[in-house]
Image (cartoon, rainbow, N blue to C red):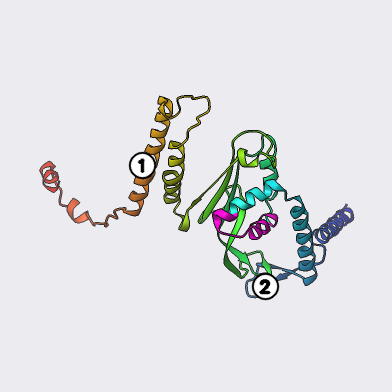
Amino acid sequence: TESKHRRRGGDLKTRSTELASAVTGSPLTAVLSASTPGKKSVVLSSETRKELAKQAKVTKEERRAQIDERHKYLISRLADGIGLSEQQVEEAIISDDKFQLIEQFFAPSGLKKLLLFYQDVLQQKSNASLRSDGSTNSLLQKKLFITMGSTEDFTGICAFFLRTSDKVITASNVSQEVNFGMFDCANGNILQGLEFFLSQIMIPALKSQQNWGAVKEGLKNSQIQDFLYSVDKFVGTLSSSRQNIEDKIQLTKVDIDIYVSNLQNPSDYITAG
């Protein structure tokens, strides 16, 4: 039984080694740091880095081949809004590990929104080793990336695309079925960014809207007026909340023990009050 157990352990170790080699494409060396016992650094060999770079290049070219007029429409909107060239936007998108979300957005009854952040991100130096304790040298650089909006901190510009129906998005209908917008939350000031977006862009656009679908009266309809009033009120609440945060009153801590210790009867409380 003991020998069988040893063989199974040896087989498991062998399979793990084979799996690691299959994933990386070349040997992966684990080195224990002498200065920080117990912490492990993973150092990729030059062959591994070359293989990973090669695979990444192949993936990017495959994605580049998939770019059609729908993608180009999104790219042009992003380039105009953020201030990048279309080539820079395309490169960022095809390099993104969430590239498949674009296809899910185009699909019939697909994703209702597609979000991208453009903000400062810590990016690893190309020649740095990967360490399990996250202590790799890195640089703070602007990056455009696709996001679900729930996993990364939002500190810069949010660009978004919204679908107006469940139709499949095609090259011929993308400009009618997809709306583009963005708001700037520089330095993480989300309230100010949302307030500006609603008050300066959305509300003026809504109030100038002529076609309200089944509502023939348009802006004269009482429900439409109530809706616009609610939006105005919401923006006012945002503005008040932002001002309260920015102009907050900080109370100084006061030692009240000397006052409380002298209170003996109800009249003392009244006098203290």
Q: Residues within 10 Å of mark 2 (few under 14, many from 20)?
A: few
Q: Nearer the viewer, residue 97 or 218?
A: 218
Q: Which residues are magenta?
A: 79-95
Q: Is residue 150 above or below residue 61?
A: above
State the residue in front, 9 or 151. 151
**Residue 241 on the magenta segment:** no
Q: Percent position (x, y) of residue 96?
A: 67, 55
Residue 91 highlighted magenta (yes or no): yes
Q: Residue at x 66, y 75 (%)?
A: 34
**Quadrant of residue 135 within the rendered picture:** bottom right
Could you tell whether 183 is left or right of 26 in the image? left
In which quarter of the view is residue 62 placed? bottom right
Give the crowd class for mark 1: few <14, some 14-19, many >=20 residues within 10 Å. some
Residue type pointed to by label 2: Ser
Decide if residue 219 is in sight here: yes
Which mark lies nearer to you, 1 or 2? Answer: 1
Q: Look at label 1 and name its amino acid.
A: Gly
Q: Residue 237 location in percent, x, y?
A: 37, 41
Q: How many marks?
A: 2
For residue 134, say whether it is visible: no
Image location (x, y in percent) of residue 111: 64, 39
Predominant secondary structure in magenta? helix
Q: Which residue is mark 2?
A: 33
Residue 145: give x, y in percent of width and height.
Answer: 62, 55
Return the disc, 1 or 2, that comes first in the chain's sequence. 2
Local SS, label 1: helix
- On the image, numbered disc 1 is attached to which residue? 236
Residue 214 position (above or below residue 134): above
Label 2 sits on a secondary structure element that is loop
